[in-house]
Image (tube, helix red, strand yellow):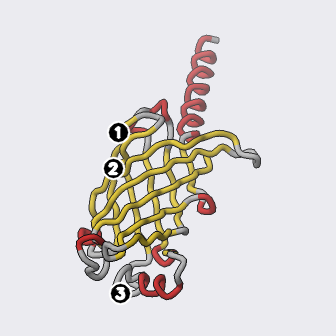
Amino acid sequence: MRTHTLAAVLAAALAFSATASRAAEYRIDPAHSFVQFRISHLGFSWMVGVFDRISGSFAFDPAAGPAGQKISVEIDTASVDTGHAERDKHLRSPDFLNVRKFPKATFVSTGYEGDARGGTMKGNLTLMGVTRPIAIAVKKTGEGNDPWGGYRAGFEGTTTLSRKAFGAGMNLGPASDTMQFFLSVEGIRN
């Protein structure tokens, strides 16, 4: 009888462990996630745009601590949209993003510092064939049940990147070298 009890306890512990690890995995909802950017236009004004086709997955499990938090994102560079068709066509060209040669940008996390409310997500961004480490300031915007029987979690993040570091496009002067990014990611728990 004792062997059966021990086996039942071990089986329950393994089942709980498997459920807990699955509970932390989310797939990014592309309909509710985007990467927005802002760049100075020659130092005279701001140009704002968005990459609105992103996909990927993340792990969010506060009980696992910083080591349990990770994300992998893929951005469709051709989805750049500034609200001006001719400018968007130019941004997709070899002068800037060269989307035919580099159709995807990716971010893969390498570490997290913070708690369940927010912190700094570090990782490698690959853009136009160049990979560089970056840091994104992140904070949780919410989590809970959705109306369709699923469970969701949402996060936002900000970072500033040097275009020159990634070889991203023609020189527009010193005011236009850095770009500010705002990311909004919503995931559906697997």
Relative vertical location of residue 2 with respect to residue 68 in this rendering, above or below: above
Which label's residue is closer to the chain start, 1 or 3?
A: 3
Q: Position of residue 116 (x, y in %)?
A: 47, 35
Secondary element type, mark 2:
strand
Which label's residue is closer to the chain start, 2 or 1?
A: 1
Mark linked to residue 122: 2
Cα–Cα gap, marks 1 and 3 = 37 Å
Which label's residue is closer to the chain start, 3 or 2?
A: 3
- Tags 3 and 2 in contact by the CB under 8 Å rule? no
Secondary element type, mark 1:
strand
Residue under label 3, please give it. 94
Amino acid marked by disc 1: Glu
- Tags 2 and 1 in contact by the CB under 8 Å rule? yes
Local packing at callout 2 (Cα closer than 10 Å; few below 14, some 14-19, many 20+) is: many
Amino acid marked by disc 3: Pro
Cα–Cα gap, marks 3 and 2 = 29 Å
Q: Position of residue 28 (x, y in %)?
A: 56, 56
Residue under label 1, please give it. 113
Residue drawn 25% across and 76% down? 173
Secondary element type, mark 3:
loop
Local packing at callout 1 (Cα closer than 10 Å; few below 14, some 14-19, many 20+) is: some
